[in-house]
Amino acid sequence: MTSAPHPPFSLPTQDELKALVGRAALQYVEPDSIVGVGTGSTVNKFIDALAGVKERIRGAVSSSEASTARLRALGITVFDANDVDALAVYIDGADEIDPRGYMIKGGGAALTREKIVASMAARFVCIADASKQVEVLGRFPLPVEVIPMAARQITRRFAALGGQARLRLQGGQPLVTDNGQHLLDVHGLHIDAPLAFESEVNQWPGVVTVGVFAHQKATLCLLGTAQGVQTLRFD
Ligand code: 5RP
């Protein structure tokens, strides 16, 4: 006797994994609260899901002009960060996340406002697909927002650490962030002491924000995998 063939089985796409964790993050949104909202393609899925429960929240504090536009287009009130005392939760993606919940962020150029909004929140819920998991931070080029006149000096300082900093371009011109500054993407780093690294780079003159989120690490991560959403909790 021959058994019937199994139906074709396909793995979820990266986009489907992003949508999965975006929806899963709703469980951390408290009723009648103001939610901290990050930036990026994964967060866009979260914003779309948030629109479905918008009557149950007061609104959001946003980490970028792009997220603000998407939130407003879906009818979600966006508060100025200066008008809000504290947030219960900040929900954002990551470019890399390590086993301790330390992250590299800023692939979407929004790292400075992301760090500000994250600092207002009691909990940072990271939403990411499994491709973002790493053992050691640094494979993804580290974004660093800089005052334009300091870019060359900061490039030299990274070179002394073995990193190659490249000015991020958009349409052939230096990318200008929401804060009117430039971005360096630093290749070739191996960041095995993220807390010390973040503290060190942060105090270089001209650095606005370094994209290592160690002092502002994730409280937990909702990781999208082929088996479903995995919840990683960090101490
Ligand atoms: C934006 C970020 C994003 O969270 C990060 O780049 C991940 O983006 P995506 O969800 O599109 O993969 O830090 O500055």
Image (spheres, rainbow, N blue to C red):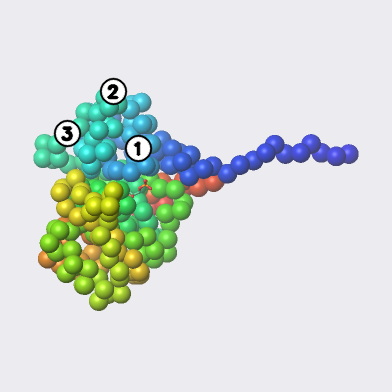
Q: Which residue is mark 1?
A: 44
Residue at the image point whose x is 38% and y is 42% from the top: 42
- Tell me the distance, in whole angstroms, between the alpha carbons under discs 2 and 3: 16 Å
* Badge 1 element: helix
Query: Residue 22's x, y, as percent?
Result: 39, 38
Quadrant showing the C terminus: bottom left
Residue at the image point whose x is 28% and y is 23% from the top: 55
Instruction: Find out whether the residues at labels 1 and 2 contact each other: C-beta distance under 8 Å.
Output: no
Q: Which residue is mark 2?
A: 55
Respond yes or no on whether mark 3 lies under 8 Å from ligand 1: no
The three-letter amino acid code for the residue at tag 2 is: Glu
Q: Residue furthest front?
A: 172
Q: Residue furthest bottom?
A: 160
Q: Nearer the viewer, mark 2 or mark 3?
A: 3
Query: Residue 61's x, y, as percent?
Result: 21, 37
Q: Nearer the viewer, mark 1 or mark 3?
A: 1
The three-letter amino acid code for the residue at tag 3 is: Phe
In the rendered image, the vertical position of residue 190 relative to residue 35, given as above or below: below
Question: What crowding class fits label 3: few (fewer than 14 Cα within 10 Å), some (14-19), or many (20 or more)?
Answer: some
Question: What crowding class fits label 1: few (fewer than 14 Cα within 10 Å), some (14-19), or many (20 or more)?
Answer: many
Q: Which residue is mark 3?
A: 79
Residue at the image point whose x is 17% and y is 41% from the top: 86
